[in-house]
């Protein structure tokens, strides 16, 4: 299987539309269709169910999409890390979600900097759910991830902390006087819908909530009475005075882990991970 064919298939499988996939790839639609047909013949499997109006993944296609994404990420990661090594860049790149685990991250960086032979650590702060992809495609060497929201499949991890979640509301809202809430209480809130975050390709899901791009924008919308937000308990001390947080009893526990590629043999990275687990 050629890398080009795999890229073609992933684009079609994600778009479920040959025209949009061809536009995304910058090629014409007929050669894209022929490439997918050749791939199906070579694999001896139907990857896409096609009708005049719709395209759907078959079971085999779903497997190839999952495996193909991982393979393409690995190729990109190898390219990026090789270029960094060739450029003589000895540092580590750590990615974390902006506004999350701030205290833990600061302690980790300070503790690692005090270790003998510590290397410079570049910190990338990203939007929700982006740190996993930055790690998988080689733009980062190590990441702070948060389950159950981020996937750790195929990565090595060490657990760092566990915490509950709170619902963030405008200060003075009637529900802020309660000692705790449940999910059913906030789904019924008039005028305070949950936000809508962009997907991997920048598109927003349908729904009544406002479109948001980062935590600062979200918290301002909550303060204005336009949305509610569910955040880890550790966010509470950093909230503005015009916001209030109430424990959400039935929200899933958030587990923060440090994650890295399983094939890494970097001694500085191993030292950083040891430092994190000691914290």
Image (spheres, rainbow, N blue to C red):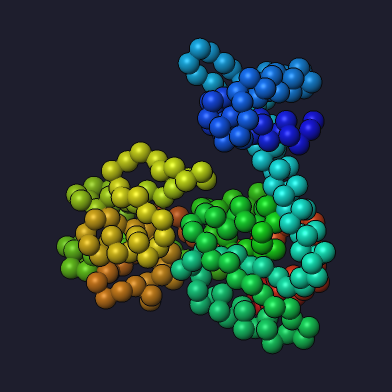
Q: Is residue 156 left or right of residue 217?
A: right
- Residue 258 in sight here: no
- Where 187 sits versus 237, above or below? above
Q: Residue at x 64, y 72 (%)?
A: 122
Give residue 64's quadrant in the image.
top right
Residue closer to the observer: 242 or 186: 242
Residue 93: horizontal and vertical position, in percent?
67, 68
Q: Residue at x 48, y 16 (%)?
A: 53
Q: Quadrant of the N terminus?
A: top right
- Where 240 sits versus 15, above or below? below
- Residue 244 in sight here: yes
Q: Is residue 232 left or right of residue 152?
A: left
Give residue 258's quadrant in the image.
bottom right
- Outermost residue, top side: 52
Residue closer to the observer: 135 or 270: 135
Q: Residue at x 66, y 30 (%)?
A: 9
Residue 77: horizontal and vertical position, in percent?
73, 53
Number of marks drawn: 0
Residue 79: horizontal and vertical position, in percent?
76, 53
Q: Residue at x 27, y 69 (%)?
A: 243
Residue 60: horizontal and vertical position, in percent?
67, 25
- Where 107 sits versus 202, above or below? below
Q: Quadrant of the C terminus?
A: bottom right
Give residue 125's quadrant in the image.
bottom right
């Amino acid at each position: 299987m050629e890398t080009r064919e795999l890229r073609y298939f992933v684009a079609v499988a994600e778009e479920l539309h040959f025209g949009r996939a061809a536009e995304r790839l910058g090629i014409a639609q007929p050669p894209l269709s022929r490439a997918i047909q050749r791939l199906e013949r070579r694999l001896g499997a139907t990857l896409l169910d096609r009708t005049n109006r719709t395209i759907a993944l078959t079971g085999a296609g779903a497997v190839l999409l999952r495996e193909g994404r991982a393979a393409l990420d690995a190729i990109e990661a190898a390219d990026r890390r090789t270029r960094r090594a060739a450029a003589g860049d000895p540092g580590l790149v750590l990615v974390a979600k902006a506004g999350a685990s701030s205290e833990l991250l600061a302690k980790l960086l300070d503790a690692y900097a005090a270790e003998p032979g510590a290397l410079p650590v570049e910190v990338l702060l990203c939007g929700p759910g982006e740190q996993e992809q930055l790690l998988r495609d080689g733009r980062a060497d190590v990441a702070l991830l948060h389950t159950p929201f981020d996937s750790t499949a195929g990565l090595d991890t060490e657990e760092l902390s566990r915490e509950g979640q709170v619902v963030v509301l405008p200060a003075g809202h009637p529900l802020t006087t309660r000692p705790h809430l449940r999910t059913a209480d906030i789904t019924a809130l008039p005028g305070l819908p949950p936000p809508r975050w962009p997907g991997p390709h920048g598109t927003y899901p349908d729904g009544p909530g406002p479109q948001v791009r980062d935590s600062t924008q979200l918290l301002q919308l909550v303060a204005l009475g336009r949305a509610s937000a569910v955040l880890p308990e550790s966010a509470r001390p950093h909230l503005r005075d015009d916001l209030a947080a109430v424990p959400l009893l039935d929200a899933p526990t958030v587990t923060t882990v440090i994650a890295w590629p399983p094939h890494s043999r970097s001694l500085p990275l191993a030292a950083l991970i040891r430092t994190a687990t000691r914290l």
